[in-house]
Amino acid sequence: MMAEAGCDSVSFGVETANVEILNGLKGHKAGTGSCSSENVQAGGMIAHASFIIGLPGETKSTLLETDQFARSTDALYGYHYLAPFPGTTVREKIQDYDLEIITDDWDLYDANDAIVKTSALLPQDMREFGHSYDDEMEFDWNKIVRRYHEGKPTLKIL
């Protein structure tokens, strides 16, 4: 029904593949949601999974765990950086998390740069991880745009 109404893609906020980190977010319990890229694609739409870099408790190991999961899906995927805005639980109760906010420059709160650090990751570590996917994501996006201009379906491009 969504595809028939004109919807061409669905994005899932997966956030992380690490169960411990996921369980610590907003009281969420891992397993209560899913990224069903197969169902979305079967309905004629593009599936996209969104992940966050720099969540409380993030380490190089948890980033790699998320990377392996992201690559295992049939969905396009991308990364953004944690931006703990005022009023969010993470910012208001920062002392309860393995997290330090390194700036209050609101111009940087666009999820496109690391503005936090964890006990195991510095902002530069997060940036290096994020930048390692820039070329790959740009390649995938350019493929979608090219197929669109050629009048070809944008599904199953990878």
Image (cartoon, rainbow, N blue to C red):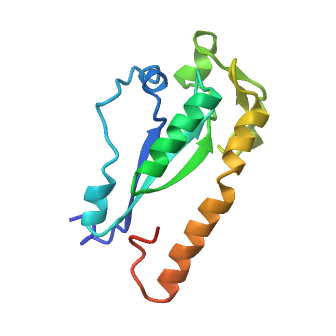
With respect to residue 51, does 143 lie above or below? Answer: below
| 69 with respect to 80 (left or right) | left
Q: Position of residue 101 (x, y in %)?
A: 72, 24
Q: Where is residue 86 in the image (x, y as percent from the top left)?
A: 62, 27
Residue shown at 31% from the left, 37% from the top: 33
- Observer-nearest of 109 and 13: 13
Which quadrant does the N terminus fall into? bottom left
Q: Where is residue 138 in the image (x, y as percent from the top left)?
A: 63, 65
Residue shown at 29% from the left, 57% from the top: 38
| 111 with respect to 42 (left or right) | right
Residue shown at 48% from the left, 50% from the top: 71
State the residue lying farthest toward the top.
95
The quarter of the displayed image where residue 62 is located: top right
The quarter of the displayed image where residue 123 is located: top right
With respect to residue 115, does 12 lie above or below? Answer: below
With respect to residue 74, does 148 lie above or below? Answer: below
- Observer-nearest of 66 and 153: 66
With respect to residue 1, does 19 lie above or below? Answer: above
Residue shown at 76% from the left, 43% from the top: 107
- Observer-nearest of 87 and 90: 90
Q: Where is residue 96 in the image (x, y as percent from the top left)?
A: 58, 10
| 55 with respect to 125 (left or right) | left
Q: Is residue 9 visible?
A: yes
